[in-house]
Image: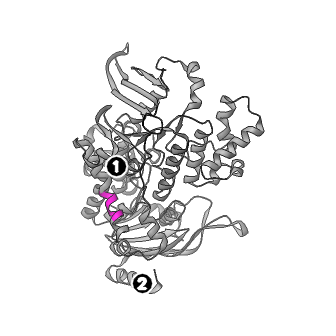
Amino acid sequence: MTRSTRARRTGEAMSAKQPLVDVRNLSIQFGQGETAVEAVKGVSFHIAKGEIVALVGESGSGKTLSALSIMQLLPPAARLPAGEILFGDTDLAKAPEAKLRDIRGDKISIVFQEPMTSLNPLHTIEKQVGEIMKLHHGLDDVTARVRVIELLKKVGLADPEKRLGAYPHQLSGGQRQRVMIAMALANEPDLLIADEPTTALDVTIQAQILELLKALQRETGMAMLLITHDLGIVRRMADRVYVMNAGEVVEEGATEDVFKAPQHAYTRHLLSAEPKGQPPVVAPGAPVVLETEDLRVWFPIKRGLLQKTVDHVKAVDGLTLKLRAGETIAVVGESGSGKTTLGLALLRLISSHGPIAYVGQRIDAFNSKQMRPLRRQMQVVFQDPYGSLSPRLSVGQIIEEGLTIQNKELSAEQRRERVGQALREVGLRAEDQDRYPHEFSGGQRQRIAIARAMVLEPKFVLLDEPTSALDMSVQAQIVDLLRDLQKRHGLAYLFISHDLKVVRALSNYIVVLKNGKVVEEGPAAEVFANPREAYTKALLAAAFDLAVVNRAAVAT
């Protein structure tokens, strides 16, 4: 974007509405002196009353730090060498802690990305939502309880009276996020900061939460600062957008202007960052790697003094599938549908009923000792590359752990060579094995997790939401990598996901689960083109309602 275009767009918006928050020339550094790292570099943005503004960019762009600076919730190591954050007559960058405590949760509230880690696991929902009102407005218990119920109803939580005594672990992801929104709205703030509020949620729940936020914003007239890497969400929600890259604002303007005529190459890159391509074609007569028939995983519900079984939670109920070499079967559905339980059962990590055959051999009765030789051939890549890699081990130690157990005949030098080869295969350098996970980006960490699985040369890989924690452009890179590895080694993938855009790019066959039962299945192209069941149609509508705006923007 040219300076004149940026100034024109900014001037038009500024003249239309008086800023509620005005961030000017903000810089954020970590460390001091020659070792200082400038994470945010001279960023300026403003938010008017009643306006929705989006900060967009990939991980590490500085968008979350810029937003957290408004409430002065930056990490202890961060400092602000320059900049103003004007909220009315107050410069929040220089405000005393007592003043900030008055503003936080009252005038400015925040909804974080992951509600499970944001809510206190030791406190009930009533206590957590009511606490903020008691603190800022001195409400008594009875009045606070009435207000809590009112808020929970407003955010669409079913049977709020029954939820008051519940703890966070007793709620689903979508329910926890609704509680977080209720907390943020408790004192009717002037500004709500929403930091990736739907990233950790299923696609249908994402759509519900976005509609809820939009409706509440219209109803209350509050301003909203939306932090996201998903431009589909931005176009659906925001009035104006600021695009950030490497700590700087590279483009800004009215949302439709930016989408229809993106000026900066990075903005165009974000708009086009969606998993593309087709899954590899399964070779005729490809051998069956894994199959099961009428698989059931039921968890008993026990009651009474003697803990008598009175019912069962039917996590997986009568599922049949056959997975061939070089094929990807996607298992899709909302949280609680049984996707991950199915994967764990097929890996023999939890008990199940029904035959499971691996390369023609029945393994459903195998104990852990009998399964151990097969573990090298059956690997898993987890959802969160931050949590699945030990921060105490080097990358080399993480990847070679399986070799140490499964290939005891290898010398230390041979293991190091195999680790280096695995890293090169996933697009990293062999010398990266001497570094630690915190030195890598999210996408690089997921490549390390994939290398850990591939170093043992498996035949079957369980992919448990391997891209959901990543930026969209990094998702596309990981999908391309997984396809390439599958073609090269004839791998069989069981791909667990709620992201249907990724499923379409990677999967040959789709199984749709709901409450443990298969509601629809078939070749991926057929299911996407002609879904038969209402539940499948709802999943597709929720996913591609957002995706279509990305494709329209790129086409423009």
If the image is split into quadrants, where does the C terminus sit?
bottom left
Kindly give the residue lying farthest to the top in the view shown.
Answer: 306
On the image, the x and y values in percent for residue 479 come to 48, 50
Residue carrying label 2: 5
Main SS category, magenta section: helix
Amino acid carrying label 1: it is Val
On the image, the x and y values in percent for residue 155 come to 28, 51
On the image, the x and y values in percent for residue 46 come to 42, 74
Left or right of 80 on screen, residue 189: left
Amino acid carrying label 2: it is Thr
Instruction: Tell me where the magenta segment starts and ends, as one range.
Output: 545-551
If the image is split into quadrants, where does the N terminus sit?
bottom left
Residue nearest the viewer, comparing 85 with 299: 299
Separation (CA) of disc 1 from disc 2: 36 Å
Asked if disc 1 and disc 2 are in contact, CB closer than 8 Å, the reply is no
> Do we see residue 431 in this rendering?
yes
Q: Is residue 66 above or below residue 524?
A: below
| Dot 2 crowding, Cα within 10 Å, few <14, some 14–19, many 20+ | some
- Closer to the chain start, of discs 1 and 2, is 2
Residue 203 numbered mark, or none: 1
Residue nearest the viewer, comparing 350 with 153: 350
Q: Secondary structure at mark 2?
A: helix
